Structures are given as C-alpha cells and as structure tokens.
Amino acid sequence: MINENQEYQSSTSNILNLLIGMVVGGLAGALTMLLLAPQSGKDTRMQIQKKSIELRERTTGMVEDTMAQVRLNANRLASDGREKIHELKQQGQKLTMKQLDRVSAAVDAGKTAVKSS
C-alpha cells in the first residue's frame, strides 16, 4: 500500500513540476519578447495600419484594372459580334438573291415550256 501511495505522489509531483515549469517558461518567454521587441506596440499598430491601407489601395487598383480590362473585352466582343452579324446578313441576302434568281429562271423556263406546248 505504501508503494502505490508513493507512486501516486510521485506522478502528482511530476505533473505539478511540469505545470510549474510551463508557467515559468511562458513568463520568461513573454518577458524576453517584451524586452527584445524591435518596436513598441503603438509603432507596431501604426505599421499594421499603414500596411493594411497600402494593401487595400493595391487591391482596389487591381480590381479597377481588372474591371477596365473586362469592359474592354466585352466591348470588343460586342463589336466583333455586330460585325459578324452584318457579314452573315449580307451573305444571307446574297444567297437569297441567288435562290430568287434560280426560281425566276425556273418559272421562266416553265412558262416557255407551257407556251410552246
């Protein structure tokens, strides 16, 4: 029974020592970080604010450039589409005229055939 009790105390002691070591280490790290920081918190906040403004401006510029490029491409596509429609319309009119000429020739041939019979 003494053996089990000693093992329990030993494991509890080890856990307690580990926790104390973690707390002391964390405090030492925080103190070291504060002492060796390259600048104050106020300076760091100002730097973060400046960088965020710079990033926002760059992002806004990129979005504006992209939108201008999209508009340019859309206008180009619309213009190309209008040209293509005009070309197709002209081709359709030419084909229609050719077909009308053929039908007229066939009608004339039919009339001539009827008259001669």
Image (spheres, rainbow, N blue to C red):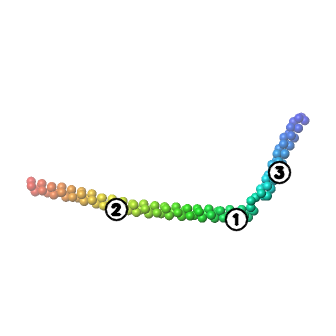
- From the viewer's side, name the closer residue of 33 and 73: 33
Q: Earlier in the sequence, mark 3 or mark 2?
A: 3
Closer to us: mark 3 or mark 2? 3
* x and y percentages locating residue 49 in the rendered image: 67, 64
How many numbered marks appear? 3
Looking at the image, is mark 3 or mark 1 earlier in the sequence? 3
Classify mark 2: residues with Cα within 10 Å, few (<14), some (14-19) or many (20+): few
The amino acid marked with disc number 3 is Val
Q: Which mark is residue 24?
A: 3
Label 3 neighbourhood size at 10 Å, few (<14), some (14-19), many (20+)? few
> Could you say which is closer to the camera, residue 70 or residue 31?
31
Q: CA distance from mark 2 to mark 1?
A: 60 Å
Query: Circle 1 sits on which residue?
Result: 46
For the residues marked 3 and 2, what is the alpha-carbon distance in whole angstroms?
Answer: 82 Å
Residue 88 location in percent, x, y?
33, 59
Residue 115 sits in which quadrant?
A: bottom left
The residue at the point 30 percent across, 58 percent down is 91
Q: Earlier in the sequence, mark 2 or mark 1?
A: 1
Q: Is residue 14 above or below residue 35?
A: above
In the picture, residue 42 is in which quadrant?
bottom right
Element assignment for label 3: helix
Q: Hey, which residue is sitting farthest left in the picture?
A: 117
Does 25 sit above or below residue 41? above
State left or right for residue 55 relative to residue 16. Answer: left
| Residue topped by disc 2 | 86
Measure how far apart labels 3 and 1 are at the Cα level.
32 Å
For the N terminus, the quadrant is: top right
Three-letter code, disc 1: Met
Residues at badges 3 and 1 in contact (C-beta under 8 Å)?
no
- Label 3 or label 1, whichever lies nearer to me, is 1
